[in-house]
Amino acid sequence: MCVLAEPYLSDYQVDSLVTAVQETGIEIPMVVVNESGSKSYDPEMVADAVNNPISLATLRLFRDVFERERWWSFVIAERKLAEQLGLSETAEQRIPVEDIGVFSESDIRYVDPIQDGAWSSLPTDVVTEVGERADVVVRYGFDLINGDILTAPQDGVLSFHPADIRYYRGLGPPRAYLDDQPRMGMTLQRLTDEIDAGEIIAIDHRAVGDCLTLWDVYDRLRDVQRRLLADGITNLRDPDFEPTRPDTLGPYYSITDRRKATFALQVLGKNLAGYLTRIRGRYRTATTTR
């Protein structure tokens, strides 16, 4: 298996790789890292802000994030502030690719993708090498990708989508959260040239009706992601397995929607209501145990 990655991976992404290696014995001969980065800000600065308490560097990063994300940047800031105040247990860690144990024997290649609007493709020599060395690719970086990389490995390129693509494509969890969906899915799909329109290799759902914030929803779905890659690899090895080709796909919600004031403030307001519920619950528990 080849991995497409950013310079840093989140802890739950690393967990999914570790679980896949442990449970399926799959090897990772090659890791292709997005050298240019998929964001408009320094990945080291992002990792420092995610991994550490709020500092002046965090505030400088907020300025950069605001340039890109506009109103959604306040929702991101709310998450970090809630973490610092002890109102949220959804903190994650960013880990440099070079420090990830399952990559210790992998060849790590840093590559500048070829950009075409929102889409990116990989150089021909990289695509050829991936096809020769891997049966399947899992994508944890490079944002939207297309081109020959999608068909170079035998089993294509797998990618996670934090929703059931038959109901929510694109901006899945925030939209479903505002829709008060009681259950949400995590899809492991085989990518195509369309956004969130691939074959379903593995999928699982969780009840989220008791989640108080959007970040609680993401945490529950990321718990699913931690083992879904292993399930997907097991499925691909089964000669009787047939991927699910969805009869219908959910509507596509553009990621740019979250930058609008109306959308971001709805999420922010619902999250704040969730924190108040959590505070009241803790207060009741404290008073009844005195």
Image (spheres, rainbow, N blue to C red):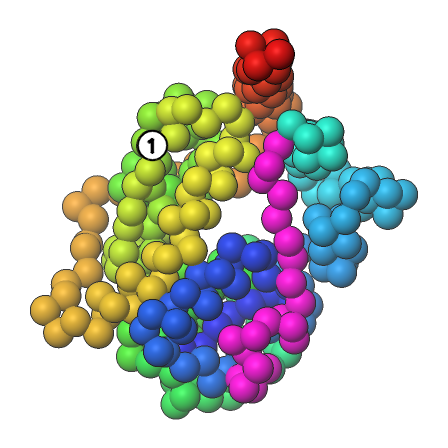
Image quadrant in which you'd find residue 288: top right
Do we see residue 264 in this rendering?
yes
Q: Nearer the viewer, residue 81 or 89?
A: 89
Image quadrant in which you'd find residue 27: bottom left
Q: What stretch is highlighted in magenta?
A: 88-108
- Residue 51 image point, x, y percent: 72, 51
- Residue 220 image point, x, y percent: 44, 40
What residue sits 41% from the left and 88% below the top? 133
Report the side of 76 relative to 179 (left or right). Answer: right
Work out which quarter of the rendered image holds the N terminus and state it. bottom left
Q: What residue type is labelled 1?
A: Ala
- Residue 169 image point, x, y percent: 38, 42
Q: Nearer the viewer, residue 114 or 44?
A: 44
Other residues around mark 1 within 10 Å, as few (<14) / some (14–19) / many (≥20): some
Q: Is residue 286 a member of the stretch shown in magenta?
A: no
Work out which quarter of the rendered image holds the C terminus and state it. top right
What residue sits 41% from the left and 65% below the top? 19
Instruction: In the displayed orientation, state which residue is furthest to the left.
Output: 240
What residue sits 20% from the left and 49% below the top? 246
Do we see residue 161 in this rendering?
no
Picture layout, residue 60 above or below residue 20: above
Picture layout, residue 259 above or below residue 41: above
Element type at marker 1? strand
Q: What residue sits right under mark 1 in the picture?
A: 207
Q: Is residue 100 a member of the stretch shown in magenta?
A: yes
Picture layout, residue 118 above or below residue 129: above
Report the side of 24 relative to 38 (left or right). Answer: left
Image quadrant in which you'd find residue 194: bottom left
Picture layout, residue 120 above or below residue 226: below
